[in-house]
Image (cartoon, rainbow, N blue to C red):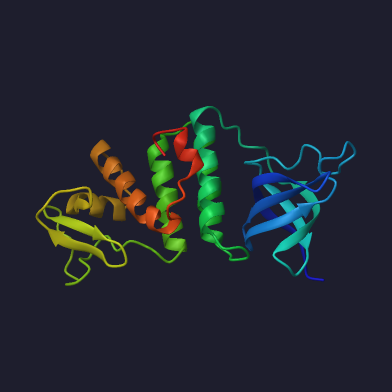
Amino acid sequence: MHRIDLTPVYVLHTRPYSNTSLIVEFFSQHHGRISAVARSARGPQSRYKGQLQLFTPMLTSWSGHHELKTLGNIELSGLPHQLNQKYLFCGFYLNELIIRLLHKDDPHPGLFDRYSKSLCSLEKNEDIPPILRLFEKKLLEELGYALSLTQEAKTRLPIVADNFYRYEHHQGFLRCDEKDHFAFSGNDLLSIAQEKFDTDLTLQATKRLMRLALTHLLGSNPLNSRKFFSVI
């Protein structure tokens, strides 16, 4: 039986299973998204009691060849990130994106690192929009949908700050004159490429662009976490 011993993970979600067990969705540093059965996790004498908490760095073991693993030992590897009010909703949003968009057993160590840094920033009550936009940008890159923010799609000419460009999914940015919901200034695109969110206008453009890019991947089923907090 295939077994993984004490690898870094975060819990993304739990749900009841059978009479006393749980199905736990993990985000693993080296193995991507993992689903595992925590047997008797809801029993009064459970060895997992109080341990399967969101936003808590831990080391976890599991076994099994199938998509649904069997959870083994758990060791906490750090203190839980204390997220309150709007920062908590942001944490739920990050978890929901990972669950919805990452395939199981597909490693994304770079995204795991960004996720961990995002939780640290949220716990410190740092400015929310840059945290979310950086995570979304990294998520698109990890999924193979990185946005080409410095070259026009057809001509491969450099993006010019004073021009406007229309975002076309599966193509990129095309020079345009009409300014609508799909159009972005070259200045904003270059700022996003450098991850410089110095103005509210750039942050608003980044949110709009990430929404457009992620909507194609999420499909018609909206994210539940977006119902609770407008910044998301």
Instruction: Check the image and name the residue furthest to the right.
Output: 45
Q: Position of residue 76 (x, y in %)?
A: 74, 44
Q: Residue at x 47, y 62 (%)?
A: 142
Q: Position of residue 49 (x, y in %)?
A: 81, 39
Q: Position of residue 123 (x, y in %)?
A: 54, 34
Residue 197 appears in which quarter of the rendering?
top left
Indicate left or right for 16 with 87 as reference.
Answer: right
Indicate left or right for 73 with 130 as reference.
Answer: right
Q: Position of residue 8 (x, y in %)?
A: 67, 54
Q: Residue at x 54, y 47 (%)?
A: 96
Residue 129 appears in which quarter of the rendering?
top left
Indicate left or right for 224 with 69 as reference.
Answer: left
Q: Residue at x 83, y 50 (%)?
A: 39
Q: Is residue 78 above or below residue 3?
A: above
Query: In this orientation, which residue lies closer to the viewer: 87 or 180?
Result: 180
Instruction: Check the image and name the residue furthest to the top.
Output: 85
